[in-house]
Amino acid sequence: MGLARRARVKILYDGQDTGLSEKALSVSYTDNAEGKSDDVRVTLEDRDLKWIEGKNSLPEIGHELDLTIYLDHWNSDLDMQSYHAGKFAIDDITLSHGAAGTVTLGAVSMPADEGFNSVWRSETWNKVTLKQLAQEIMARYGMEKLFWYGEEQILEAVEQQNESDSAFLKNLCDKQGLCLKVYKTGLVIFDKRLYESRGFKYLFTRYDIESLIYNRTLFGTYTGGEVKYTKSGGKESEAKTIDVTVGTPERLLRLNQSVQDEEEARKLAIARVNEANEKAETVSLIVIPQTILYASDNFFLDRMGVVNGKYFTQSVTHNIGGGRYSCTVSGYKVFNRL
């Protein structure tokens, strides 16, 4: 008889093993491909009420949790898998006192320097790439790692107008059709088109899935986009309105937004239409995977009829408790982008 499968976690508090791992009743960790910070929720037992009664020091807001997931004997007696989910800043603490006490910690992945999200700046750059801008901003906060997967087109003029660096970078990436993911020590900036073109990393059939919700919709999806913007005529001529259209006219997404030129308008229209069309076919499923799953990977659904196809993973929530491990996976079917 083989050894029993077991899922467990290792939780460090400010880099130290303070016994939180042994007290963890459940852990839920959500890995997002882009747009939102990763987050973790840890429920700890407080059976003797020492935390609630103040006999033991509670973990504190702003301090760090470091989470690693282990899968022991997962596919065979010798199969030992591990996944370092990362470092998270505690931003929420809930105490519960019933038949037994519990403490639930909520934490998010974000730079150690809060100025990335909270300090508003105004600055201008000329003839710079988005990658160079990202590197300059990261240096302010001691963020060392930039993973870049996209073009490095030179931007003639870029203006940050009373925005946080976080919001500024996100808006720039959106305009360029790129995705931004923020970690505590760095950034990932990537073109989804490149990620979607890769093969699939996971294959699921109906026998691998505990539950599935599939949705197909036409509402809020588009065949093309239109951006109108005003271009200054200078001292000797009047300003004029420029109209840039991409795709086909059956269902146009109309945008009225400030852009520098026609190329930026075209990129913006393409990015917004593609983003909207990600909801055309979506799926959410619960699986007990054979290996660790990651957001931004592709997976394939097979022997599922109309649901069959390749999907991009938008988020994975890892659920660990009582030695059991499952994942809730959300994604959209890969489609032909503009």
Image: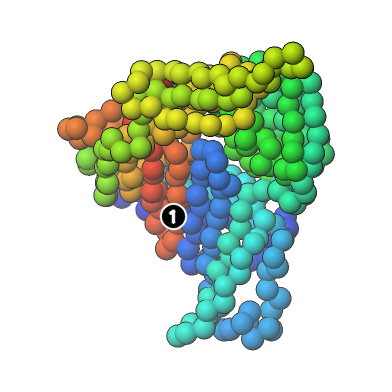
Residue 321: image x %, image y %? 44, 61
Does dot 1 land on a helix, a strand or a loop?
Answer: strand
- Of 94 and 174, which appears nearest the observer? 174
User: Is any atom of residue 202 visible in this view?
Assistant: no
Structure colour scheme: rainbow
Residue 126: image x %, image y %? 79, 21
Q: Residue at x 72, y 44 (%)?
A: 164
Is 72 drawn above or below residue 246 in the view shown?
Answer: below
Is 323 drawn above or below residue 231 in the view shown?
Answer: below
Locate residue 288 relative to residue 126 in the image: left or right: left
Locate residue 154 relative to residue 208 in the image: left or right: right
- Of 55 and 108, which appears nearest the observer? 108
Q: Tag count in the figure? A: 1
Q: Would you identify the image quadrant in which residue 17 lies?
A: bottom right
Residue under circle 1? 319
Residue 249: image x %, image y %? 35, 20
Q: Residues within 10 Å of mark 1 (few under 14, many from 20)?
A: some
